[in-house]
Image (cartoon, rainbow, N blue to C red):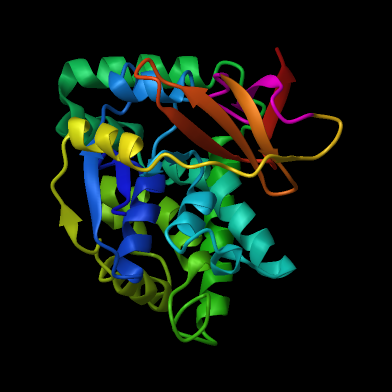
């Protein structure tokens, strides 16, 4: 079953998954979507969830990059398993540094980058959408000076880690490398000069990560992706932890930002993930997979 990635070129988390497929030499199908809603048929499938990327495998849609990486390896959690120190580094990279990197690039340069990617009207739409997306965010917002200091501390820490091995994960790149690389990737895409003061050992690691590539990208159409749903209908074991019950109608939303809700029937709830069932107008069933940590549940 060929995985289908819904993504757009300048999305850092999309780059994380594109490189994950390059790292594992996985052939995948690409559907590029708009950087902001509306996104046509995908909106109907996701029913409110608005973050990108989303990975599809048959009737299963993974709304989280960690779960998506596991799905690429037959839902094997060991491929993303980190010890406590590495998990703290991953969290630092994807929670604080992900937003802080934009403070090391001048606003004029950011606008120029967006204009080249989206066009002038696209920049207006993108900016308006991101303002709306962050309206109810629960994140701690750093000042520009705090953000620049955080990025410098992060880079220094990476330099220390990389002095002991070629990659953060050891002799070969792994999940931790993907998590720490993609926030820096977008900063370098916006302005390559931001990396000039970084230690050479970090710059060399960035080049090695970039060289992983994206694997084999296959052509696909929306019709083919929808056909995959019909041809790969499956049943998920209904295992739900208390106080919830299997079959309850619930909504799920990210707890930090882009907190749009998605409603469905609860079919799985454990310490790692939430899975809800939704029925499309075609009558076919799909399953949306969300991380338990970082998601809010609400009974409907």
Q: Is residue 224 above or below residue 25?
A: above
**In percent of the image, x 72 and y 20: which residue is there?**
298
Observer able to see residue 140? no
**In percent of the image, x 47 and y 71: which residue is there?**
174
**In percent of the image, x 73 and y 66: which residue is there?**
84
Residue 53's image quarter? top left
Q: What type of secondary structure mainly makes up the magenta span?
A: loop
Position in image of residue 246 (x %, y %): 73, 31
Q: Is residue 102 left or right of residue 19?
A: right
As for residue 256 lying within the magenta part, the answer is: yes
Q: Is residue 214 above or below residue 29?
A: below
Q: Quadrant of the C terminus?
A: top right
Position in image of residue 2 (x %, y %): 28, 53
Observer-nearest of 274 and 8: 274
Q: Is residue 227 above or below residue 104?
A: above
Q: Is residue 90 above or below residue 44?
A: below
Observer able to see residue 7? yes
> Which stretch did the figure color magenta?
245-262
Q: Quadrant of the N terminus?
A: bottom left
Position in image of residue 235 (x %, y %): 54, 41
Position in image of residue 127 (x %, y %): 35, 20
As for residue 17 lying within the magenta part, the answer is: no
């Amino acid at each position: 079953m060929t995985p289908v990635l819904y993504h757009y070129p300048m999305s850092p988390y999309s780059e994380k998954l594109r490189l994950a497929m390059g790292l594992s030499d996985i052939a995948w199908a690409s559907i590029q979507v708009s950087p902001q809603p509306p996104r046509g048929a995908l909106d109907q499938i996701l029913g409110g969830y608005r973050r990108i990327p989303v990975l599809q495998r048959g009737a299963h849609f993974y709304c989280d990059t960690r779960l998506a990486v596991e799905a690429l390896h037959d839902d094997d959690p060991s491929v993303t398993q980190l010890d406590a120190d590495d998990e703290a580094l991953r969290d630092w990279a994807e929670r604080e540094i992900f937003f802080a990197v934009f403070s090391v690039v001048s606003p004029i340069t950011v606008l120029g980058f967006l204009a080249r990617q989206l066009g002038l009207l696209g920049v207006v739409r993108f900016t308006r959408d991101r303002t709306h997306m962050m309206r109810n965010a629960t994140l701690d917002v750093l000042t520009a000076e705090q953000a620049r200091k955080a990025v410098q501390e992060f880079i220094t820490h990476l330099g220390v880690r990389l002095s002991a091995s070629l990659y953060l994960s050891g002799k070969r790149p792994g999940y931790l490398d993907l998590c720490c690389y993609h926030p820096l990737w977008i900063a370098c895409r916006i302005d390559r000069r931001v990396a000039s003061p970084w230690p050479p050992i970090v710059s060399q690691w960035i080049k090695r990560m970039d060289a992983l590539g994206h694997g084999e990208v296959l052509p696909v159409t929306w019709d083919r992706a929808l056909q995959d749903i019909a041809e790969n209908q499956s049943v998920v074991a209904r295992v739900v932890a208390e106080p919830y019950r299997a079959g309850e109608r619930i909504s799920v939303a990210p707890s930090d930002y882009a907190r749009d809700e998605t409603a469905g029937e609860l079919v799985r709830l454990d310490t790692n993930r939430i899975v809800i069932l939704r029925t499309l107008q075609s009558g076919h069933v799909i399953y949306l997979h969300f991380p338990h940590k970082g998601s809010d549940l609400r009974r409907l």
